[in-house]
Image (cartoon, rainbow, N blue to C red):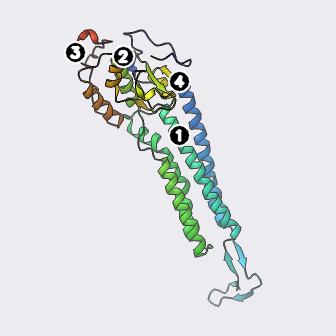
Amino acid sequence: MAEQNKSADQSPPRGSVDEPAAGWKPTAVAKSRATMFRWIAAALWAIAIASEAVAIFWLLRQREYVGEDGTLVRDPDTGLLEEQGVTAQFPQWAFITLLVLLVVIAALAITGSVLWKKANRLDPARRSETLRFFVQNQLGAIIAIVAFLPLIILIFLNKDMDKGQKATAGIVGIVLALLATLIGVDFDPPSVEQYTADQSAVIQLLGKDEVVWVDGGAVYHVCDEVSDIQTGSEKRTGTTAQAVEAGKSRLTLKFASELRACGLAVPENADAIEAALRDIQGGAVDTLLPAPVWADPADAPIEVEDAPAE
């Protein structure tokens, strides 16, 4: 493999396993970076919701009176005095400020969602924890709805805006809300189970948790001789967790051809392993990852016994 990346820890010797039964864990750097991204995202979302509150409780209550030189008349039905010829309008400055505030809320919500997604790729939730998994991965969309929906409703209910102001502000708000919500949705969220399956496959195929990648790639590889990483960029070697820290989302599904390229043994059931990894990477929760079947038992780089039944 390529020369060990300076940031990578020394790989375990052949035939040893870094506690795969405990499941995949992020590196300390990835965990720290994910925490930082989440705090920044939370701060941006808090500012977005605070901006919404300013718009609701202050800006939408602004009005100016036209015809203030009207005359006082007495309502014969109630006996109360009222000023005739005076009408309340939503000020133009407040309308422009409202449009600007809608854009600011959208920018804050979207930026927070992007950072939150990056954090989830570095430190994902477990798919088995259904509620937490959903909330953690779709929180950006939830925040976008919270930051826009009440404001949009109150824009349409505002009695001082004219039809043109309501239509413009309402349409702008709806478009920005849909955009922020769409960006906030994570359509392909990673999971601890997915990363654990990739790590387990690597260890069983190579005998150790060691993969290779390049900065411009989206996946990591089991061989440094394949054409996909002959890009002129520096080849980096490390654990699967370090590959995720570097922004690589998964193990390549072309591992069989890569093993051949490096002169390594290929399991007879490589297609079944590939199919299982594809399903798990796609979000399947009940797919069994097959153990490699070797034509010659001596080709097995590592022997892992099945855990005893509970």
Mark pair 4, 2: CA separation: 22 Å
Q: Residues within 10 Å of mark 1 (few under 14, many from 20)?
A: many
Q: Quadrant of the C terminus?
A: top left
Seen at 58% across and 46% down, the residue is 45
> Are the residues flagged by discs 1 and 3 in contact, CB closer than 8 Å?
no
Mark pair 4, 3: CA separation: 35 Å
Q: Residues within 10 Å of mark 4 (few under 14, many from 20)?
A: some
> Are the residues flagged by discs 4 and 2 in contact, CB closer than 8 Å?
no
> Are the residues flagged by discs 2 and 1 in contact, CB closer than 8 Å?
no
The part of the image, by quadrant, that contains residue 250 is: top left
Does label 1 or label 3 sit earlier along the sequence?
Answer: 1
Front residue (pair 97, 89) = 97
Residue located beneath label 1 in the image: 116
Residue 239 position, x and y percent, is: 46, 20
What amino acid is found at the position of numbered circle 1 in the picture? Trp
Seen at 42% across and 9% down, the residue is 13
Residue located beneath label 4 in the image: 234
Residue 206 position, x and y percent, is: 36, 16
Mark pair 2, 1: CA separation: 33 Å
Residue located beneath label 3 in the image: 295
What amino acid is found at the position of numbered circle 4 in the picture? Glu
Residue located beneath label 2 in the image: 206
Does label 1 or label 4 sit earlier along the sequence?
Answer: 1
